[in-house]
Amino acid sequence: METHLFDKSRIGPSELFRRIGYTAERPFLIYAPIIELTLGDFIGKIAFLATLKNQFDHAILDVRFRDTRPYLRDIIALAPNIDRALPLVKRKRSWVEKLLRLPKPTGTASLDVRKGRRHAFYDIVVTDWMADARNVHGLPGSVPLRIPPALAPSLEEKLIRLGLDPNRWVAAIHYRESSYAWRKRGEDRDSDPREYERLAHFIIDKLGGQVVRLGHPEMGPFTPREGLLDLSRIPGSFMLQAAAVSHARFVVAGPSGGVAMGWGFHVPTGLVDAVDALGGWGPMHQVVLTHEVTTADGRRLRNRDLLDSGLLCRFKLRQRQEAGETFGIRKNSSAELSAVAAHLYDATSEISAWRPPAPMPSVPVRPNHVVWPPQTRENLAFLDV
């Protein structure tokens, strides 16, 4: 039986529900069994949980996760304030579940359900949907990811050995290809690799920066050149890629999990080829450039016009296509991607070398409570190019 992070038997019953979160003796207790596996969504949920904990002077964050993909433990390690994270306990289906042909369980939360005063105790159980990244906007003081101090020196040293100059600024770029082992069907989220390779050349030759390409070994290679570090060629390099993003002047990324790394580290980010009405979180500068959709009557829709039409949603767009409507879809060109990079370059003139880690948010007076549902907001700063 696992050890509890909080033993309610150590305080009297009259104190158990008094001034919750104000003192170390009675912290706010958060339990979060997370089922999500995809890279970007998992980063968003961890960012939400870290920010939720930051609403209290004293809180304990206890996370469970499906330990089935190698990067999940790395992402958890990037959260600066998780108190405990354990894999969900696997179990077999009961005879009732088999009889009803219910799906196989993905794991069960390992709560201690013993009777008596020492059973598990939590103030809130946060579900997957509650931990959606869009709910971060409803909480003050977004908490950035942070490279663990014990790992930062060795990761930085390896980036230098691979060719990155810490005295020059660097940009990170990413896009999606359908070769990704965990989800091969990219559909309209895939981008044209040639346009992003031209973007890399623009950042190096015209803006004077270095470029780190994020991704996985199944992606097609870029032609090697000075100033370009292609980390996608290195298997199992998630933490190294995270370190590169944390030091980036800015990030330009398509609608894939890699863009969440920019948001997570509070690095100025341009989401390009956007197919959904989803912006990032955090206080840093960020912009969105959607793909272009042409309707049967010749209207060319992008950014705010695309949102207002209801077509900045890949599921709705697919439904209308399946119903017989015809749409033309054009992904961002290298000229448009370069315009986003130039905009971010101008917006980050204070950065001339590797970016220092984002500071923890300043919350002079924590509310020590949460209102649910949080008051979320649209976070789509469209960039017209």
Image (cartoon, rainbow, N blue to C red):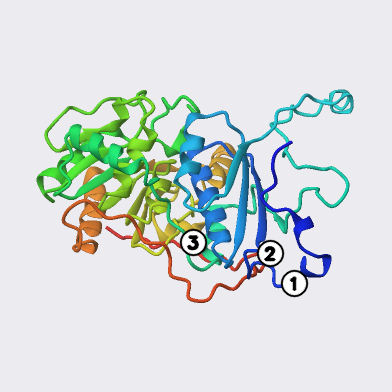
Give the side of residue 82 with respect to residue 99, left or right: left
Secondary element at image label 2:
loop
Q: Amino acid at mark 1?
A: Arg
Mark toward the viewer: 3 or 1: 1
| The C terminus: image quadrant | bottom left
Q: Amino acid at mark 3?
A: Asp
Give the side of residue 372 with respect to residue 177, left or right: right
- Residue 291 visible in the picture: no
Above or below 291: residue 348: below
Distance between mark 3 and mark 1 Cα atoms: 47 Å
Distance between mark 3 and mark 2 Cα atoms: 47 Å
Residue drawn 21% across the image and 47% down it = 170
Q: Amino acid at mark 2?
A: Arg
- For label 1, the residue is 18
- For label 2, the residue is 26
| The N terminus: image quadrant | top right
Q: Position of residue 264 (x, y in %)?
A: 42, 51
- For label 3, the residue is 308
Above or below 256: residue 48: below
> Would you say the residues marked 3 and 2 are in contact, meaning their CB atoms lie under 8 Å apart?
no
